[in-house]
Image: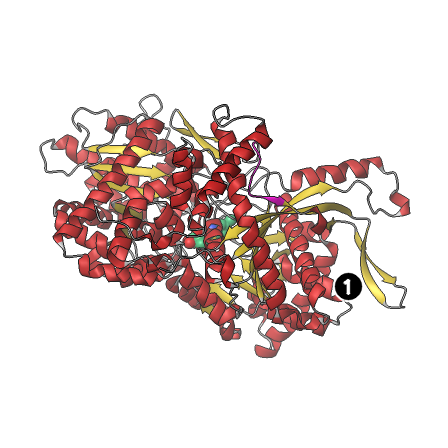
Amino acid sequence: MIKKKDTQESSSFDKELFKRSVLYNVKTLYRKTLEEATPQQIFQAVGYAIKDVVIDNWLTTHKEYDKQDPKTVYYLSMEFLMGRALGNNIINLQAYKPVKEAMDELGLDLNVIEDQEPDPALGNGGLGRLASCFLDSLSTLGYAAYGCGIRYRYGMFKQEIRDGYQIEVPDNWLVDGNPFELRRPEYAKEVKFGGYVNVRIDENGRSNFVQEGYQSVRAIPYDLPIVGYGNGIVNTLRIWDAEAIECFHLDSFDKGDYQKAVEQANLAKNIVEVLYPNDNHYAGKELRLKQQYFFISASVQEAIAKYMRKHDDIRKFYEKVTFQLNDTHPTVAVAELMRILMDEYYLTWEEAWNVTIKTCAYTNHTIMAEALEKWPIELFSRLLPRIYQIIEEINRRFIIKIQEMYPGNQEKIRKMAIIYDGQVKMAHLAIAAGFSVNGVARLHTEILKKQELRDFYEMMPEKFNNKTNGITQRRFLLHGNPLLADWVTAHVGSDWITDLPKISKLKIYADDEKCQQEFMNIKYQNKVRLAQYILEHNGIEVDPRSIFDVQVKRLHEYKRQLLNILHVMYLYNQLKDNPEMEFFPRTFIFGAKAAAGYYNAKMTIKLINSVADVVNNDPVINGRIKVVFIENYRVSNAELIFAAADVSEQISTASKEASGTGNMKFMLNGALTIGTMDGANVEIVEEVGAENAFIFGLSSDEVINFENNGGYDPTEIFNNDPDVRRVLMQLINGTFAPNDPDRFRTLYNSLLNTISTNKADMYFILKDFKAYAEAQRKVENAYRDEKRWARSAILNVACSGKFTSDRTIQEYVDELWHLDKVVLPKKVVGKDKT
Ligand code: TH1
């Protein structure tokens, strides 16, 4: 094995001090020796020891920010899907080797300790994980940034599979305490809900809008350190907890109102209780709007207070601050900023508007209609009366602008107004008030401009831009796949860790047979590691020599897990008919959480598990097809899964997946993509070449065309294609549900029945089926040629440079945020440049 260069490790890390720190923590936290401590207690002790190291850098960073006063981005997001912090912090401190040695010397296994940490899962999927990758990149690139979000008591639910069905179990991630967080009660903020708006004359004789008769909660910030890689920079993820206000500011009329006090206490308890487990879907719940305003009001108040500690002219706020809105969920920030500027700093409307439109920018992550946030006026104005008033005025002025541009055009107002048809449309507000509207992949941005947001683009083309998503190679290669990381470093040096495009130097090794063998051997070892995990968690034995074909992502109809499992059923039928046919053994691996109330998604999970039961145990199949559903897919097991994948399933209905980011993680780990020309797949194929991927199916234009003309007729395919017909009939004839043949009727209906769903096969599964099966045949043939496969896989790694979130963040900085780069004084920077 080639020896790894040691340039990735810090020379400044004091191993002996660290060991003493761990022992001391075990003693003072638990009154125990190392031998007596439980694994969880040892994790806590190690966590606190790491935090100790981080804290020094955190302090220095903020001292330096104070001195240099750099412009700061506030990344406002309802979701941060952070994943475990311990291993990541150690990696970014460049201390993995000494910490591992320290643990070895104490008789501890660092992997086992890392496994004790609960995944902080304060997000659903791609949107929340993107926010977390962005924070990693911001720190690593040396930009001043805050992530602002909610400290949900319960994050994304834990998924258990019982009898093949998903069961949701509460994720009490804070039970054992979080060693990395810092409670900051000195920065608490009051957030007000309800009541009514009054005009008051203040002591200076100015008339002023005030909210009265409200209920309020206290927002308490908890800070989590975001450690930059090897540069000593530590930014902050600030997540807000809610506490009841014990002495409330009620009017004299309400004093002693016991009922109100109880309601106020309940409000505080409920508001941060749980993350809504809906990905790409808007449910319109009142509590969700409360959550949004809660963390936005607290974050905006704090951003302004922090600015005013150093500056005196609030009119220049935008010179030092940008608010990036992660989808429309934080869009009330626009009105909250206006409110504070006018009601608390006495700016005129025009002055406040000038600040607001230069501060706020909006990222769109989806064109799915069901994800659009539209709040009923009644609910919105009752909960946020002053905010609603301000939005009404923004709307009034926006409509005037529309009329100036399109005189007499009522249609434009109907389509573009912020308030219309009894609803407040958050996307329209974000577009009207932001200086930027960006999509998250080139194709997605083009669809926004040409279709979804066409009217807005025509009116304000200068606001629209693309920022193709990215991922952090530090978590998804350096931490998640140490074997491949070391191999890459041995061949091209360690620059890729902070400069991913350098990984392209691997290209020259793609045709080198020795390198191909080494690469395939590493992939094999990672497959053995995952096979072990599957055996432990599923009790299923899988063959690491089979093709590992993986689809892991949220369960959603547009992502088409159903297409994947229908194809497995089709392969099963083929092998049953013709047991002697040539067939390369394949393991189909799924991992996905379904929103708790999403029936078709949950039944798809049941179907996958039912097919698994039949196929895995059929002697005719004899292990040549295995189907595995990995329970509780989350960031920590994702790292194992990407490392072990041969085939990456990215098979969304073209136009529906705005970007995807899992696709990039697979590529970075040397899996080949089978996918549609959707989202960032387009750019992945552009980088790696179509010959190193398996592209199939309708294009986004074709899909949109069908949709604009009332869909297509799947019955024709059903009638004319016996293979498809057989698979569909198996959904309703008990093949996979002998005791309840009707179990999958709803899935069958979603594909064929125009009566119950109005539109059949809205996601073009039957339309794309044949092309998918053909692409899968090509996958199998390609895999038989091991050298060719290895070459393609190495090229996927080598061409993944574009998809680092470092590149994405640099584009945001250069084109939108214009942040100042911060450099720390030499002594705190841990990086050993030898
Ligand atoms: C996802 C998109 O579906 C995905 O394509 C993209 O890569 C990712 O965002 C990051 O940009 C979205 N997640 C959500 C979650 C909610 C609402 C809308 C979207 S879009 C709750």
Pick the residue in front: 481 or 368.
Answer: 481
Residue 629 horizontal side relative to residue 438, left or right: left
Image x and y of residue 509, in percent: 18, 57
Residue 67 horizontal side relative to residue 617, left or right: right
Pick the residue in front: 820 or 419.
Answer: 820
| Residue interval drawn in magenta | 176-182
**Going by the picture, which residue comes out furthest to the front?**
16
Quarter of the image where one finds residue 100: top left
Tell me the quarter of the image containing the C terminus.
Answer: bottom left
Residue 633 horizontal side relative to residue 816, left or right: left
Q: Residue at x 50, y 23 (%)?
A: 36
Image x and y of residue 38, in percent: 49, 26
* 180 within the magenta span: yes
**Going by the picture, which residue comes out furthest to the top?**
739
Q: Which residue is mark 1?
A: 343
Q: Amino acid at mark 1?
A: Asp
Secondary structure at badge 1 equals: helix
Image x and y of residue 274, in percent: 58, 39
Observer able to see residue 84: no
Image x and y of residue 426, in percent: 59, 58
> Principal SS element in the magenta part?
loop
Pick the residue in front: 470 or 711.
Answer: 470
